[in-house]
Amino acid sequence: MISLALLAFVMSLVFTVWVRRVFIRSFSHYAPDAPQRFHVGHVPRMGGVGLLMGWTLALASLPLLQWAGMAGNIELDSGLHRWLFMLLPAVAGGVLEDLTQRLTVRWRLLLTLSSGLLAWWLLGATVPSLGFAWVDGFWSRWPWLGVGLAVLAVTGLPHAFNIIDGYNGLAGAVALVVCLALTHVAIQVGDRELAAMSIALAAATAGFLVWNYPRGLIFAGDAGAYVWGLLIATISLLLVHRHPSVSPWFPLLLLIYPVWETIFSIYRKLWRGVSPGMADALHLHQLVYRRLVRSVLHEDEVKNMLKRNNRTSPYLWSFIVLTVVPATLFWRYSSVLLAFCLLFAVSYVVAYVMLVRFKVPRVLQPPRQ
C-alpha cells in the first residue's frame, strides 16, 4: 500500500505541474466580477487532469509493483478499465467546462448522471439497506430504490465537491481526509481492492495539494471535483454493498459537509426564487471569507487576497474533523452515525445564521494585523 501511495503521489505531483505548464494560457478565464472568483490573476483550472493521471497510472502500475515485491496481494477484481469507463462521461464534460466555461448546468448534470448509471451497470454500485431493521424489510422488497439512491449519490457528489471547491486547499483536504477514512475501514473489513483505490486517490490528491495550497498555482476545476465525487461515491457504495457490517450512514457522515452544503444551497436559492444552478457568493466558505478572514492587510493586492484565501480553508477543516472522527470510530453503528449527521446539520445552520447576522463569537475573530 505504501509503495502504491508513494507512486500515486509522485505521479500526481509531476503531471499536475506539467498540466499547469501546458494549459497556463490555453483556457478560458473567469470574468473579473464572477461570484466564484476569490483570486487575482489567471490560474489554470486543469488540476483534475493531473490528479486523474496520477491515480490511473499508479493503479495501472500495480502488476509491476507486485512483480518487484512492493505491493502485496492487491487485486483489482472490478477491472481498472471499468472504473475509467465510468469516469469518462463526467470527467470529459468537466475538462470541456474547464477549458471553455460554456457547458451548461443541464449538460453537466446529464453527464454525471451517465457516470452514475455506469457505476451501477459496470461496478454494481447500489444501496442494499438503510441500516435499520424496521425499514430494511421494505427496502429489500424494492431493489430499484437502492439502485436509484446509488445513482443519485454518484450523480450528485461531484457537484457537491464542485460547490465547496472555492478556496485553496478546501475541497482537496476534504477529499484527502475522506479517502484516508475509507482506506481505514476498507482495511478493517479486508477489502484490499477498495483500500488500494482510496489510498491511491488520497495520495494523488496530496500531490495536487502541493501546488494548490497555499500558493494556488493551479485549481482542481470541474474535472477535479468530478474525479473526487465519482470515485469517492463509488468506493463508498461498493464498501457498503460488499460488507454488511459497514453502515450506509458511514459514508454519509464522512461526506455530510459537501452534501449538506449542496442541499442547503438548493433550499436557500429556491426560497429566494432563483435557479439552484446559478452561481452565487453565499456559500458557507464564502461567508467565512468575508466575515471572519478580513484582517489581512497588505499593500500588494495579489498577496493580500492570496493570504485571505489560504486562511479561509482552516476554518472549514474543523468541520471535517467533527464528522470524519466519529464516522471512523462508529462506522458500524447506524444510530450513532445518524445522530452525528443531524448534529452537523443543526450546527451548520446555526453557524450560517450567525455569519449572516454578524454574530460571530469574538474567539473566532482574529486580531487585525
Image: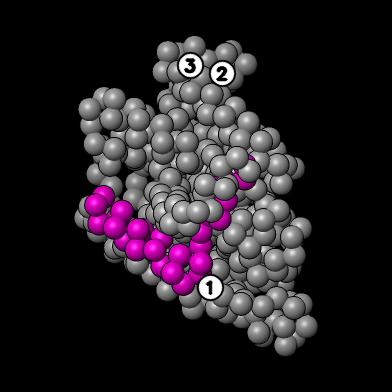
Residue 296 placement (x, y as % from top left) = 50, 27
What colour scheme governs how the chains and residues are painted in the rendered image of this protein? one colour
At a point 25% along the width and 57% down the height, the residue shown is: 107
The mark that comes first in sequence, 3 or 1, is 1
Front residue of this view, candidates 154 and 142: 142
Q: Which mark is residue 354?
A: 3
Q: To which residue does mark 1 refer?
A: 56
**Mark 3–mark 2 distance (CA, rounded to whole Å):** 13 Å
Quadrant of the image containing the C terminus: top right
Q: To which residue does mark 2 refer?
A: 365
Front residue of this view, candidates 77 and 53: 77
Residue 91 placement (x, y as % from top left) = 38, 64
The mark that comes first in sequence, 3 or 2, is 3
**Mark 3–mark 1 distance (CA, rounded to whole Å):** 43 Å
Q: Would you say 173 lies left or right of 101 here?
A: right
In the rendered structure, which amino acid carries the disc numbered 1?
Answer: Thr
Q: Would you say 111 lies left or right of 196 here?
A: left
Question: Can residue 156 be seen in the rendering of this structure?
Answer: yes
Q: Is residue 258 above or below residue 345?
A: below
- Bounds of the magenta span? 105-132
At a point 48% along the width and 16% down the height, the residue shown is: 354
Q: Which mark is residue 36?
A: none
